[in-house]
Amino acid sequence: MSNAAYQRLTHRAARLGALGEAASILHWDASTMMPRGGGAARGEQLATLAGLAHEMMTAPDVAEDLRAATAEGAWEGANLELMRRAHARATALPTSLVEATARANSTCEKIWRDAKAASDFAMVRPALEEVLRLQRETAQALASATGLSPYDALMESYQRGVTAAEVEPVFEAYEVFLRDALPRAEEIQARRGPPLPLAGTFPVGRQRKLCRRLSLRLGLEAEHSRLDQSVHPFCGGTPSDVRITTFYNEADPAKALLGVLHETGHALYERGLPKEFARQPVGEAAGMAAHESQSLIIEMQACRSDAFLAFLGPRLHQLFGGDAAPYAAENLGRLWRRVSRGFIRVDADELTYPAHVILRFRLERAMIGGELAIADLPGAWAEGLHALLGIAPPDDARGCLQDIHWHDGAFGYFPSYTLGAMAAAQLMKAARAATPGLDQALALGNLRPLVTWLRANVHGYGASLGFQDLLRAATGKPLDPMDFQEHLAARYLQDDAAMEASAAFSLRARGEGMLR
């Protein structure tokens, strides 16, 4: 009887997975192909799918099967445990709230596009207030069911097993590190002088061909992927039909190129998930911090390394022509790893990017907690960014309107970005130790050794392990933020006389603020 119950649950999970895949494709289409007039209908379609999925998950016979089911083997046991977790969260929410949330998110996201273009926060404020109201209602319901705080209950939607109380000291320690590291990195850059710019125009058609060629070279199969254009780069679709997007700037090919390398990292993770558990909870990714680690180990750790840039530079020069000097690996490194106190998160360098995430983490916690009203968001944003980076945005487009996340209902997502960056540095350190000749392969444009290691140590585990256990299995320890700081010091502070002091500080701080 118990095995029959488990089989019924896996059948239901497969149908739920198919509904989720359909919703993902509809989201992708809304960002790439859908005409503006289709927004209202698309919102209703997504709300209906969300409602159907919720009804399937909360049907009375699901609870009966969960009580009766047993599983044979570690994978099946993990799958059953994830089903129980998903059911507990789903039954905490009425279908009406799930559908209302989907409609509000879709409506707000469409308005946000116009508000961002006009740099006018007032345009989207009422819609965002409705999104926040529903997110707070959702958070309270989930908190009651799980015993977590409301904000932690939302975080759990994106990365299970990590709480704000664990993240906060890690972010506070990074803020202390940044106060010293940022001015030192800026001083080093000033002594070196500015990099040579990539001059000229870069036709979109050539950029598109280059981006597609590189994503295929990294291992993303043509028969299982698409590359399209959107306002905000993302990776969507399904593990067998991955959709990545980017946007193009004819004056700067780095925008599209680095975006595609990042999204290809996400796509490779999806392609590497265990196929035998497709459309099962255990066959999904381990969470969004884990996902971000995979995009960032490809883009930041591998493809912005000196070794890979030595491979990439001559090919860029061959494609775009002009003076060869700007395409030298050393110059590309200085150009694409340049530290700058900027307003835009997606354009930020490795050193300052966590500051953008820390800001959003603090603001969204305050909004969910009822301590920050939507009307006060622009001012709080400006104050927070000034405290972290010493700058304030000149307008809404470069302030609180720059990201899609809150306008699409994604509260609790932002910590995953910096947790992922820290995990990427830790994973790359382990991959180098386990894979002799890794950098030599990168210098030939060959990411196969790295991707092979990731397949075995990250991708293939699916969601059978949580974020921390996944890192323990791959690196022998939970998240260690010092690996990220040491990576940054080696890349940005290596010729500074104070580096020895930084290294000594890192050794003293090891273990302090470690996220377990």
Image (spheres, helix red, strand yellow):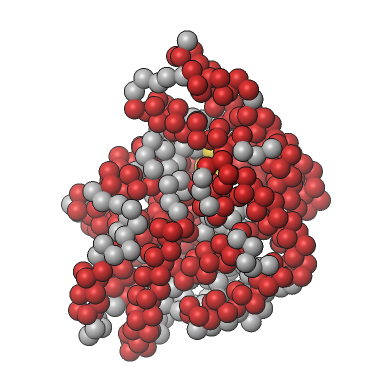
| Residue drawn at point x = 63 percent, y = 29 percent | 58
Horizontal arrangement in the rendering, residue 157 relative to residue 286 (left or right): right
| Residue drawn at point x = 62 percent, y = 67 percent | 371
Horizontal arrangement in the rendering, residue 105 relative to residue 345 (left or right): right
Kindly indicate the quadrant of the structure image that contains residue 501.
bottom left
- In the rendered image, residue 496, in percent from the top left (x then y), is placed at 25, 83
Identify which residue, 119 or 196, lies in the foreground. Answer: 119
- In the rendered image, residue 391, in percent from the top left (x then y), is placed at 53, 83
Identify which residue, 147 or 209, lies in the foreground. Answer: 147
Res. 226 visible in picture: no
- Does residue 238 lie above or below 57 as drawn? below
Kindly indicate the quadrant of the structure image that contains residue 365.
bottom right
- In the rendered image, residue 262, in percent from the top left (x then y), is placed at 46, 56
Identify which residue, 279 or 308, lies in the foreground. Answer: 279
Kindly indicate the quadrant of the structure image that contains residue 486.
bottom left
Horizontal arrangement in the rendering, residue 23 relative to residue 261 (left or right): right
Residue, far bottom: 191
| Residue drawn at point x = 62 percent, y = 45 percent | 141
Res. 279 visible in picture: yes
| Number of marks in the rendered image | 0
- In the rendered image, residue 79, in percent from the top left (x then y), is placed at 44, 29
| Residue drawn at point x = 65 percent, y = 77 percent | 379
Identify which residue, 385 or 106, lies in the foreground. Answer: 385
- Does residue 503 lie above or below 96 as drawn? below
